[in-house]
């Protein structure tokens, strides 16, 4: 082979090798991207909030309906309101948590040794902190909030239940201020979720301070449906006028909403899970902002 032809052939080989390397590079780069996508999917956070209606109605049959639906939904974090324990009735949150395999944090303004205790609870799948409690102002309304730190996606999760009278907006506004002070004192970052029974619509004036910092997950997912109580009620019309008062609020810096829907809204043999429906939300944690 002549020297010129050898040099030509060598040049062609170099160009072919470079071309093959360029084609292979995106394939090699896609592996980390796929791993990141799988990790993001694995870190999806599922949240359920439900007012239990304490021991009203046929609690054993209601309990069975709640257990079946929670087992199907597999939420990572559950906020429960109107949780009761009394002589003859085991703490409802602890009972449900044990049956489902969740860690339970129960909070109440009632003394720890009282025979009857009523309050809120958080159920957490996986690992996290013990529950913290804050009694909400004004103290004579006997309201509280619970907080846990979930290790999944580094989430600070709060559960609460605000004043219930329709004309009690000023009281709820004070409770929101107390709740936000609790968040400021205990949250670790932007991945904050606040769930519960707020006893008012998400756009009510008394929740303005909450909305200034956090977004309504259901309204984000359903901007037109959210304002229609007949189609988006979280109160069970079998017992109460339609109204959307159970909410999950989230920090837009920490999450994107993937889904929000009403659940636990069907009866079986005339038995409803509660006088409220549940709200189930799926959120995608966002990378920390710099």
Image (spheres, rainbow, N blue to C red):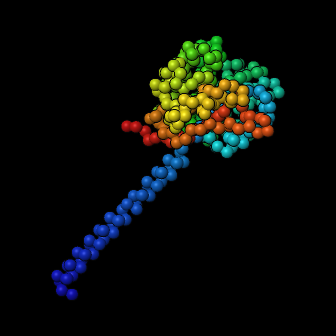
Depth order, front residue of 130/198: 198
What residue do we see at 74% from left, 29% from top? 91
What residue do we see at 80% from left, 31% from top? 58
Q: In this orientation, does residue 121 appear? A: no
Going by the picture, which residue comes out furthest to the left? 4
Instruction: State the quadrant of the C terminus.
Output: top left
What residue do we see at 17% from left, 82% from top? 4
Left-right relation of 105 to 65: left
Q: In this orientation, does residue 215 appear? A: yes
Q: Quadrant of residue 84?
A: top right
Depth order, front residue of 239/123: 239
Depth order, front residue of 148/142: 142
Residue 85, horizontal then vertical, whole percent: 75, 26
In the rendered picture of this protein, how many numbered marks are placed on residues? 0
Q: Quadrant of residue 87?
A: top right
Left-right relation of 145 to 113: left
Left-right relation of 146 to 85: left
Residue 118, horizontal then vertical, whole percent: 71, 23
Instruction: State the quadrant of the N terminus.
Output: bottom left
What residue do we see at 27% from left, 75% from top? 13
Give above or below for 113 relative to 257.
Answer: above
Left-right relation of 255 to 171: left
Going by the picture, which residue comes out furthest to the right? 88
Depth order, front residue of 142/2: 142
Residue 102, horizontal then vertical, whole percent: 67, 39
Residue 25, horizontal then vertical, whole percent: 36, 62
């Amino acid at each position: 082979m002549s020297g010129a032809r050898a040099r030509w052939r060598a040049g062609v080989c170099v160009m072919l090798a470079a071309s093959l390397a360029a084609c292979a590079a995106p394939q090699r780069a896609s592996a980390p991207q796929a791993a990141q996508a799988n990790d993001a999917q694995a870190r999806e956070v599922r949240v359920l909030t439900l007012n239990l209606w304490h021991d009203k109605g046929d609690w054993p049959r209601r309990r069975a309906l709640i257990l079946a639906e929670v087992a199907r939904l597999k939420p990572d974090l559950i906020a429960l309101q109107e949780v009761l324990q009394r002589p003859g009735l085991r703490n409802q949150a602890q009972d449900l948590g044990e049956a489902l395999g969740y860690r339970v944090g129960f909070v109440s303004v009632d003394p720890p040794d009282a025979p009857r205790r009523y309050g809120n609870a958080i159920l957490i799948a996986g690992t996290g902190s013990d529950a913290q409690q804050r009694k909400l102002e004004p103290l004579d309304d006997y309201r509280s909030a619970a907080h846990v730190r979930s290790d999944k996606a580094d989430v600070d999760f709060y559960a609460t239940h605000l004043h219930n009278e329709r004309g009690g907006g000023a009281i709820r506004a004070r409770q929101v201020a107390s709740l936000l002070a609790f968040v400021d004192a205990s949250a670790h970052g932007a991945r904050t979720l606040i769930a519960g029974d707020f006893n008012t619509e998400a756009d009510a004036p008394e929740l303005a301070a909450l909305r200034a910092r956090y977004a309504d997950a259901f309204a984000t997912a359903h901007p037109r449906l959210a304002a229609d109580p007949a189609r988006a009620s979280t109160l069970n019309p079998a017992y109460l006028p339609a109204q959307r008062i159970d909410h999950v609020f989230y920090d837009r810096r920490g999450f994107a909403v993937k889904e929000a829907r009403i659940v636990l809204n069907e009866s079986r043999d005339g038995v409803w899970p509660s006088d409220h429906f549940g709200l189930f939300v799926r959120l995608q944690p966002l990378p920390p902002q710099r």
